[in-house]
Image: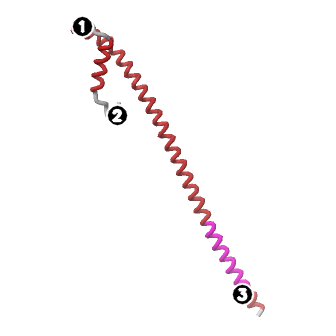
Amino acid sequence: DEAETLRQNAEESHQSRRSLLSQSRLEARRIGLRARQDISERMERERIGVDEEMAERIGVAEADINAVKAKAMEKVKDLAVQPAREIVKVMIGDSVTQATVHKAIDTITSRQKPLKNGT
């Protein structure tokens, strides 16, 4: 009789431990899933932040490039003015003003189609 009681107590204790172990595993899974979700959300926020920062940096770089291009084109136009004035003087026998040549160059360059890469 005492042996049966001890066996029942051992069985109940074993069942109790198995139940506790099962509950502990479920809680560990929940904690792991919650941690994984938190990490995923944090990584997504960081990725969005990096994307926004890169877009801003690219915008600034493009603006800088466009400014340098515009400045270079103005220098090219300025370099073209004097030879163009000389050519016109030789061709028509009369000189033209620098402003007239600038206007003609602007007209010609505005008609040109951009190259494939956008320049």
Q: Is residue 68 left or right of residue 18?
A: left
**Which corner quadrant holds the C terminus?**
top left
- Residue at which label 3 appears: 8
Image position of 45 with respect to 100: above or below: below
Q: How is the image coloured?
A: secondary structure
Image position of 113 with respect to 8: above or below: above
Secondary element under disc 1, as helix, strand or loop, is: helix
Q: Position of residue 93 (x, y in %)?
A: 22, 5
The quarter of the picture where residue 63 lies is: top left
- Which mark is on residue 90? 1
Callout 3 crowding tier (Cα within 10 Å): few <14, some 14–19, many ≥20: few
Is tag 3's residue or tag 1's residue first in the polypeptide sequence? 3
Q: Position of residue 101 (x, y in %)?
A: 30, 14
Q: Amino acid at mark 1?
A: Val
Highlighted magenta segment, given as a residue range: 7-28
Q: CA distance from mark 1 to mark 2?
A: 37 Å
Q: Amino acid at mark 3?
A: Gln
- Residue at which label 2 appears: 117
Secondary element under disc 3, as helix, strand or loop, is: helix
- At 54% from the left edge and 50% from the top edge, which residue is drawn? 45
The quarter of the picture where residue 110 lies is: top left
Q: Position of residue 38 (x, y in %)?
A: 58, 56
Q: Residue furthest left?
A: 92
Between tags 3 and 1, which lies in front? 1
Is tag 2's residue or tag 3's residue first in the polypeptide sequence? 3
Callout 2 crowding tier (Cα within 10 Å): few <14, some 14–19, many ≥20: few
- At 51% from the left edge and 47% from the top edge, which residue is drawn? 48
SS majority, magenta: helix
Say whether marks 3 and 1 touch (CB < 8 Å). Answer: no
